[in-house]
Amino acid sequence: MNEIPVSASRERGPDAPAPVANLTQQGEVVTTRLGALSVPGGNDLISRFLREFGEWAWLECSFVGGLIPEGARVLDGGAYVGTFALGLAERRPELVVAVEANPAVVPLIRHNLQALASDWATLEHGLLGDGETPVNAPHATHKDNLGSTTFAAKTDEPDAADTPAADLPLLSLRTLRLRHGDFDLIKLDVEGFELAVLQADAVWLKERKPTLWLECNEDPGVLPLLDFVAGLGYEVHYFAFPSFNPENHRGNPEPIFALAYEAGLLAVRPGTPVTLPLLHERTGCDLVQLRDRQHLRECMWLTPRWGLAEWTALPRSRLLALCSRLHRGQEFRRFLTVD
């Protein structure tokens, strides 16, 4: 996921690692709740979370993992260094197929899976999409965040010529099913290619309805994604969770980011029980069954994506006061001043 604004980190102490110019040349081993993981290191966002908290997106993994039975078969699309795949270990999956496209990360996740899940997890290196459309060379959408690497066109540089990705296998859901068998859970965090993945295997999805867990960034593309999934006959829920877990593995009470949330779309067979566990309720997660795209827009609008650290300690009355001032477009620097 790439929603967190990595450039707006908290102030770091004198022992903070220096910025890394080329993360692909860095690496370190970090002890986490999942075991010892090889990670890019330096200022890479997920490496920092693993280093300081011993976990990354554990609230996501534990919530989604709790919805699948033991012995499930899982596709982890956009696996990065393997935190989601390895986080399913408690569910004793029969198989997890982790797909990662970024060549800078592949040696790291390969090592992690071989060291910690060699009997039930396997790696596929390639770009998960429709299996046919050529893609561009990888580039990160956020500095110091290899997890935001995308193969889509650089839309913020309309005049730049994109370079085709050389020798990158193009994978589809159908290809992976034929190679490994069907899946009970399909997780997709593939930086904008989620809809293409699903559309290319729509007939099978409509018939079998495996559980889907799909990245949901603040991008207009999530609206047609919701429409498509709902059109397959799924019941769709919106799940939002804070990037900082106050009950993190290291017991570190100091967040890296204030009020930063991630979110996803959970699609299940109609009638499947979906509730918010106690851990997720007390740590500030949000779960809503969606009606339509307008409802999704409202849920995303009410999800914290960024804020100031001092806001988290304010009494409710003062926080509401700030909200009312912002709602009216007021600024303190002009409050009760005479022009």
Image (tube, rainbow, N blue to C red):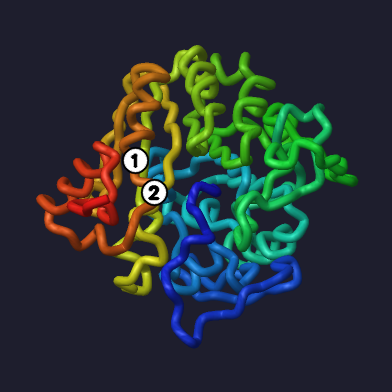
The answer to whether residue 221 is above or below residue 51 is above
Q: Residue at x 46, y 17 (%)?
A: 230
Residue at point 46% right, 14% down? 233
- In the rendering, at what x and y percent does residue 122 appear? 67, 51
Residue lying furthest right in this view?
Answer: 167
Q: Residue at x 77, y 56 (%)?
A: 103
* Left or right position of 307 against 328: right
| Marks 1/2: CA–CA distance | 7 Å
Q: Amino acid at mark 1?
A: Thr
- In the depicted structure, whether residue 237 falls above or below residue 322: above
| Near-viewer residue (274 or 60) | 60
Residue farthest front in this picture: 339
Mark toward the start of the polypeptide (1 vs 2): 2
Disc 2 residue type (three-letter) = Tyr
Instruction: State the SS at label 2.
Output: strand
Q: Which residue is mark 1?
A: 303
Asked if the residues shown at circle 1 and circle 2 are in contact, with their CB atoms under 8 angstroms apart, the answer is yes
Which residue position holds label 2? Answer: 261
